[in-house]
């Protein structure tokens, strides 16, 4: 429960876990790894920011959206294992950024998720990462985050 208290201390709330919108599961456990399906920046079912970075969405908005997406991932992790304190290590984060042509600052957008995980878990929040630009993302979300944690 200390991880959930830390989320509150950081000024955020753990949301309800999002439900799948198509034919997939929100997580899969294999051995001691928990794989979280891609999450976007929905708050209470509504996209926080829609559109492309470098066009309709600013880097600052994308950074916030990235943090929201990782909070949705954490909600799925809690649903899967019951307690966020059971996370031993954040292993890998993939960030997909809905990017306008010529936008090349995806790493700064995905930092919203990465820096939040490091603030939350310290050294155990540091992870391998990939920040990619995409020409389109589902439902016109500006960000999608995929996460793998060791439990």
Image (cartoon, rainbow, N blue to C red):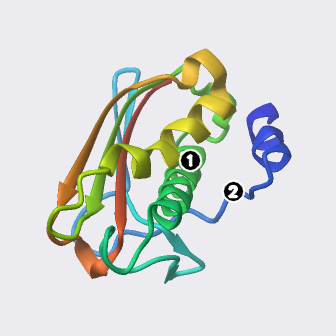
Would residue 113 appear left or right of 122 to someone viewing this image? left
Describe residue 15's horizontal placement relative to residue 59 as left or right: right
- x and y, in percent, of residue 109 in the image: 42, 52
Q: Residue at x 17, y 72 (%)?
A: 136
Other residues around mark 1 within 10 Å, as few (<14) / some (14–19) / many (≥20):
many
| Residue name at image x 62 percent, y 65 percent | 16
Q: Residue at x 38, y 41 (%)?
A: 147
- Please identify the quarter of the rendering in which residue 119 is found: top right
| Residues tagged 2 and 1 counted as in contact (Cβ below 8 A) | yes
Task: Give the SS element for disc 1.
Answer: helix
Quadrant in the picture for residue 96: bottom left
> Residue sitting at 23 percent across and 60 percent down?
103
Residue 36 visible somewhere in the drawing:
no
- The secondary element bearing badge 2 is classed as loop
**Residue at far top of view:** 123
Which mark identifies residue 74?
A: 1
- Extreme-front residue of the structure: 102
When the figure is inspected, residue 22 is found, relative to residue 31, above or below; the finding is below
Q: Please determine whether, in this image, residue 115 is positioned above or below residue 72.
A: above
Q: Which one is nearer the viewer's eye here, 95 or 19?
A: 95
Residue at mark 2: 14
Of the two numbered discs 2 and 1 on the same chain, state the one appearing first in sequence: 2
Mark 2 Cα within 10 Å, few/some/many (few <14, many 20+)? some
Nearest the eye: 62 or 105: 105
**In the image, is residue 74 above or below residue 1?**
below
127 left or right of 81 in image: left
Q: Percent x, y for residue 115?
A: 56, 37
Which quadrant is the N terminus positioned in?
top right
**Is residue 29 or residue 104 the one in the foreground?**
104
Marks 2 and 1 sit apart, C-alpha to C-alpha, by: 7 Å
């Amino acid at each position: 429960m200390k991880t959930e208290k830390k989320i509150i201390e950081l000024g955020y709330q753990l949301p309800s876990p999002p439900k799948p919108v198509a034919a997939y599961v929100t997580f899969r456990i294999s051995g001691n790894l928990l794989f979280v399906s891609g999450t976007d920046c929905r708050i209470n079912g509504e996209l926080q920011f829609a559109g492309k970075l470098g066009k309709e969405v600013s880097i600052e908005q994308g950074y916030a959206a990235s943090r929201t997406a990782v909070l949705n991932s954490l909600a799925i992790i809690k649903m899967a294992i019951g307690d966020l304190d059971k996370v031993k290590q954040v292993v890998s984060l993939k960030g997909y950024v809905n990017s306008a042509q010529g936008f090349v600052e995806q790493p700064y957008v995905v930092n919203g998720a990465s820096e939040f995980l490091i603030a939350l878990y310290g050294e155990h929040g540091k992870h391998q990462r990939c920040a990619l630009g995409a020409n389109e993302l589902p439902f016109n979300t500006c960000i999608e985050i995929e996460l793998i944690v060791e439990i």
